[in-house]
Amino acid sequence: MPVRTPSEAVELAEVAGIAKSRRPLGRLLAGSALAGAYIALGGTLSLVVGFGFPEITAANPGLQRLLSGLVFPIGLMLVVILGADLFTGNNALLIPPFIKGRLSGMEIIRNWTLVWLGNFAGALAFAYFLVYIPGLTSAPCYSDALASMASAKTGASFGVIFLKGIGANWCVCLAVWLALSGRRLGEKLLACEIPVMAFVALGYEHCVANMFFLPLAMMQGAPLDVATLFVANLLPATLGNIAGGALFVGALQYYLHAQKAVK
């Protein structure tokens, strides 16, 4: 059976957006925490695999990015297949029903806020209990990588992080949209793999991933404080992610492919 058309994907996104916005509070928070943990799992793999061969990757920085990018998408695969709630994915999925008047602006703000907080809780818990306490990234190669990552992610300007946030969630939401087009498990997994691998390899900024990487770096001694974490990275990355997902995917896909736009 062929994959779904772009118009059918828009219709599925509308249904999914409405369902996510009206999920009971307990299920929404549980699904959001799980999504944060899933992304943190992908982040852990990207650290262990991408930075685990320092002798090789030091002279081949593109190889490190490729290795990290290849394994990081497991997080989005779990989110998409198991139906968890990811802030960045919801940035796109709630837009088609909003444009059609089936969701209000307040419903979107409520959903995005609760899911963002739930994602943060899940990512933070995973970082502390399943990475830091067991010592999965305590080796010097990982501690050094986390410290360098924290410096880069909080040392750039607000505008640069914002633009990188657009790039990250453009890729992530394109992956979500491609997964909507797939009918089989393999198609959905491949849809998640390629765009997400691209954003990781290109060094874009994903706020939920950074909810894992930056707190873990702090746990392992990186010179980063909470205020800098939020102001220098999470705020601009979140705003960029909203723009990348809501405008570049949700709104544009609706404009191009909703049934009323193609008649």
Image (spheres, grey):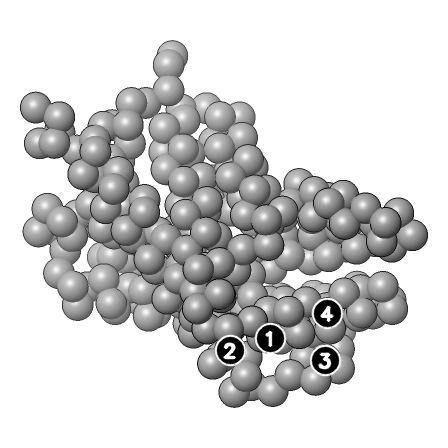
In the rendered image, residue 17, in percent from the top left (x then y), is placed at: 26, 48
**Looking at the image, is 48 positioned above or below residue 16?**
below
Q: Which residue is mark 1?
A: 155
In the rendered image, residue 132, in percent from the top left (x then y), is placed at: 74, 72
- Which corner quadrant of the image does residue 12 belong to? top left
Q: Regarding mark 4 in the picture, which secondary structure is present there?
A: helix
In the rendered image, residue 11, in percent from the top left (x then y), is placed at: 21, 34
Sooner in the amino-acid sequence: mark 2 or mark 1? 1
Sooner in the amino-acid sequence: mark 4 or mark 3? 4
Cα distance, mark 1 to mark 4? 10 Å
Sooner in the amino-acid sequence: mark 1 or mark 4? 4
- Amino acid on which the number 1 mark rests in the picture: Gly
Q: Which residue is mark 3?
A: 222
- Amino acid on which the number 2 mark rests in the picture: Ala
Q: Residues within 10 Å of mark 2 (few under 14, many from 20)?
A: some
Task: Out of 45 and 153, give the one closest to the viewer.
Answer: 153
Cα distance, mark 2 to mark 3? 15 Å
Q: Regarding mark 1 in the picture, which secondary structure is present there?
A: helix
Cα distance, mark 1 to mark 3? 13 Å
Q: Which residue is mark 4?
A: 148
Cα distance, mark 4 to mark 3? 9 Å
Q: Is residue 46 left or right of residue 159?
A: right
Residue 182 visible in the snapshot: yes
Sooner in the amino-acid sequence: mark 2 or mark 3? 3
Q: Nearer the viewer, mark 1 or mark 4?
A: 1
Q: Nearer the viewer, mark 2 or mark 3?
A: 2
Indicate which disc residue 232 carries: 2
Q: Residue at x 49, y 26 (%)?
A: 187
Q: Quadrant of the C terminus?
A: top left
Q: Residue at x 51, y 73 (%)?
A: 157
Q: Are marks 2 and 3 in contact (CB under 8 Å)?
A: no
